[in-house]
Image (cartoon, rainbow, N blue to C red):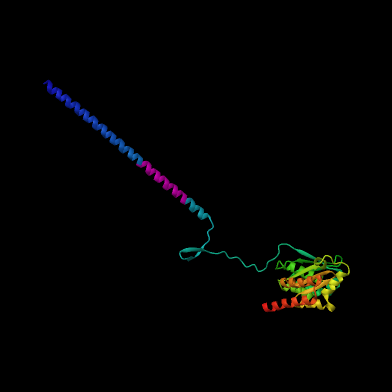
């Protein structure tokens, strides 16, 4: 009887131990499942948070794009949109924003020719260049300024060069070439700049070599190089194109230094032949 009770007690203890072990195993399993579900929940919340941030950024970009001025699309070229180009009205006249003025001093010996040709000069400057011009007899200066009708910004400088060329001694028709052509220039220099040792009668002899008998040498230089030359005392004024001015200046310097006119004319003839062949 005692043996049966002992066996029953052992079985009961073994059953209780097995039940306790089972409860512990189920508790561990439950804890594992709970931890896994918690991790999955955290991941899901993180994904939802990232999605929400992306949607918020896209909404902000959309709002900014709606606020911007976007050019309308008018055409498609190979799948690419072409924006409409802005259209600006044509600027037919270029008016100056402020008045500008130039003044040219007229020498005493050119005052009478200026009064004689004043009508022709003013007609050219006022009607063609749309400028104002006036002469001050006390100051012996010609004043040129722009007006509201002045279209070209370079007209004022062209008119000043035209009056300055006339003041140097060029004829009105020759000086007007500065207004019609863009590649004409006026160069002036002194005979003493070429040879500084000239003094006294030697200066007059150098001027005589440049002018020639009856102006023959000067006319030959002008015709060979297609320029205009003015001899005013010891100063030389040349009107012409850049290359032609360089050629005639070289010839004048040679004459001042004492080269024979025949040699200078020979060089000018060769230069004129080269120009004809080039044309």
> In this view of the protein, can residue 115 be seen by the observer?
no
Range of the magenta residues? 40-58
Looking at the figure, which quarter contains the C terminus?
A: bottom right
Residue at left offset 36%, top offset 41%: 41
Q: Quadrant of residue 17?
A: top left
Residue at the extreme top: 2
User: 122 or 111, which lies in front?
Assistant: 111
Residue at the extreme left: 1
User: 64 or 200, which lies in front?
Assistant: 200
- Say above or below: 129 vs 31: below
Residue 224 lies, in percent from the top left, at: 75, 77
User: 188 or 32, which lies in front?
Assistant: 188
Residue at the extreme right: 200
- Say above or below: 143 vs 10: below
Residue at left offset 42%, top offset 46%: 50
Asked whether, in this view, residue 63 is left or right of residue 3, the answer is right
Asked whether, in this view, residue 114 is left or right of residue 25, the answer is right
Looking at the figure, which quarter contains the N terminus?
A: top left
Residue 199 lies, in percent from the top left, at: 87, 67
Is 60 inside the magenta-drawn segment? Answer: no
Q: Quadrant of residue 190?
A: bottom right
Is 50 inside the magenta-drawn segment? Answer: yes
Residue at left offset 24%, top offset 31%: 21
Q: Quadrant of residue 208?
A: bottom right
Residue 36 lies, in percent from the top left, at: 33, 39
Residue 57 lies, in percent from the top left, at: 47, 49
């Amino acid at each position: 009887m005692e043996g049966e009770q002992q066996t029953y007690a052992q079985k009961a203890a073994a059953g209780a131990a097995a039940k306790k072990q089972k409860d512990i195993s189920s508790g561990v399993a439950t804890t594992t499942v709970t931890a896994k579900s918690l991790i999955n929940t955290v991941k899901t919340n993180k994904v939802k948070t990232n999605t929400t941030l992306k949607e918020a950024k896209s909404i902000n970009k959309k709002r900014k794009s709606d606020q911007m001025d976007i050019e309308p699309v008018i055409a498609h070229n190979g799948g690419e949109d072409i924006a409409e180009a802005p259209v600006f009205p044509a600027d037919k006249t270029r008016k100056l924003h402020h008045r500008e003025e130039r003044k040219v001093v007229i020498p005493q010996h050119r005052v009478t020719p200026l009064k004689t040709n004043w009508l022709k000069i003013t007609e050219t400057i006022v009607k063609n260049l749309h400028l104002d011009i006036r002469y001050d007899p006390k100051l012996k200066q010609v004043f040129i300024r722009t007006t509201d009708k002045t279209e070209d910004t370079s007209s004022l400088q062209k008119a000043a060069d035209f009056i300055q060329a006339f003041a140097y001694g060029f004829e009105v028709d020759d000086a007007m070439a500065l207004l019609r052509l863009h590649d004409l220039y006026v160069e002036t220099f002194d005979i003493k700049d070429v040879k500084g040792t000239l003094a006294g009668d030697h200066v007059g002899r150098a001027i005589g070599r440049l002018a020639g008998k009856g102006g023959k040498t000067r006319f030959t230089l002008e015709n060979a190089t297609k320029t205009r030359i003015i001899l005013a005392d010891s100063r030389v004024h040349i009107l012409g194109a850049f290359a032609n001015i360089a050629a005639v200046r070289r010839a004048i310097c040679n004459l001042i230094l004492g080269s024979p006119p025949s040699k200078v004319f020979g060089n000018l003839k060769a230069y004129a032949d080269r120009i004809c062949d080039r044309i």
